[in-house]
Amino acid sequence: MKFKLNWMKGLLAAGVCGMVGMAQAGAEPLKIGYSDWPGWIAWEIGIKKGWFEEAGVEVDFVWMDYVESMDAYVAGKVDAVTMTNGDALVTGGTGKPSVGIIMNDFSNGNDMIVGAPGINSLADLKGKKVGVEEGFVCHLLLLTGLQKEGIDPAEVAIVNTPTNETPQVLQAKAVDAIGAWQPNSGQALKSVPGSKPIFTSADAPGIIYDLLYVSPESLDSRKEDWAKVVTVWYKIAEFIRDEENLDEALEILSARVGIKPEEYEPFLKGTYILTLDEALERWENKEGLGSVYGSSKVVDKFNVDFEVYEKPLDIEKYLNPSLTKAYAESLKSE
């Protein structure tokens, strides 16, 4: 969540998935930076099936690493980017604000605290070392788990570790547990026989939401086009939630990251794709992890406590459910 990487030299180096859809004559395509997470790779379904063309909107999806996608957004290279609700606050608090308009999913087990052999619960971590990247979502996940179990965080030694290095650190026995998200968490489980998840995002549903965040300028000037993107997303969500489409969905998602469909299936299962009705419930502005507003308040406090940025942010400026609600209303009149 501390974004200090520079924007890559040119969008071609990041990889461009291509332009899809048909916007009004003369309009530039909407540019969306997206990265390796099941709820965001799901956009591939709309791309492959031509649903953006059907909706009448032209979209240029730019595939890149997650941190680079956020750097690209801050640099104004894309109009929108896929981010967690916590990371959106960081890009706003340290770089450029954005507005979440589509809630794709919440993490449902992909983010894990993985214990080494012999570590069977969070209680076993007292007096032990945990490798986790400080200030990132798995650090928050660890603290959330410790709080739920009534464990003082001071009883656990945090070893600041880049997330992509956590499997190696666990394998080297330098720590007793690690905090990571897929595919790093899965890699740790495979590389260390006897290791196991001792707390996951499924134990704290709503601690991590994944959204499409748009620049305020683009949302103001291209609201009709973004409304069309919303309609495509819920067509994707309906498709992916239908068990009859599972094999096709896995084929499309796994192809994006170059692995076999059966290898990708656990990643998809660890991601709760939200239907329209479920998203509307979580768009309600209330306290607690069952609301993206309540979740974002928790993350905002975490970011301030760990000096990611100095002062609490105005959460409501980062979330705008109006296009989703308008789409839901339009369905009632059909």
Image (cartoon, rainbow, N blue to C red):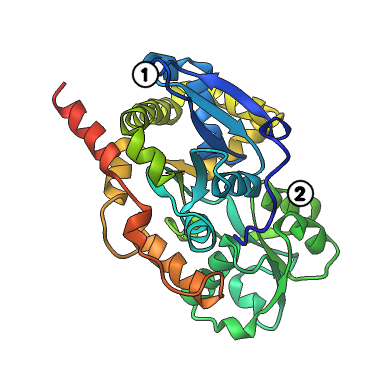
Tell me the quarter of the image containing the N terminus.
bottom right
Residue 44 versus residue 95: which sits nearer the camera?
95
Residue 279 versus residue 186: which sits nearer the camera?
279
Q: Whole-percent x and y of residue 35?
A: 60, 39
Residue 274 versus residue 98: which sits nearer the camera?
98
In what element is the residue under mark 1? helix
Q: Residue at x 19, y 28 (%)?
A: 330
Q: Height in image: 204 above or below 245?
A: below
Residue positioned most to the front: 26
Q: Amino acid at mark 2?
A: Lys
> For residue 173, what is the image quadrant?
bottom right
C-alpha span from label 1 to label 2:
42 Å
Q: Height in image: 281 above or below 313?
A: above
Q: Residue at x 64, y 27 (%)?
A: 16
Q: Whole-percent x and y of residue 119?
A: 69, 69
Residue positioned most to the right: 172
Q: Amino acid at mark 1?
A: Ala
Mark 1, residue position: 55
Q: Residue at x 70, y 30 (%)?
A: 12
In what element is the residue under mark 2? helix
Tell me the quarter of the image containing the C terminus.
top left
Mark 2, residue position: 190
The crowd level at tag 2 (other Cα within 10 Å; few <14, some 14-19, many 20+) is some
Q: Does residue 261 appear in the picture of this structure? A: no
Q: Is tag 1's residue or tag 2's residue first in the polypeptide sequence?
A: 1
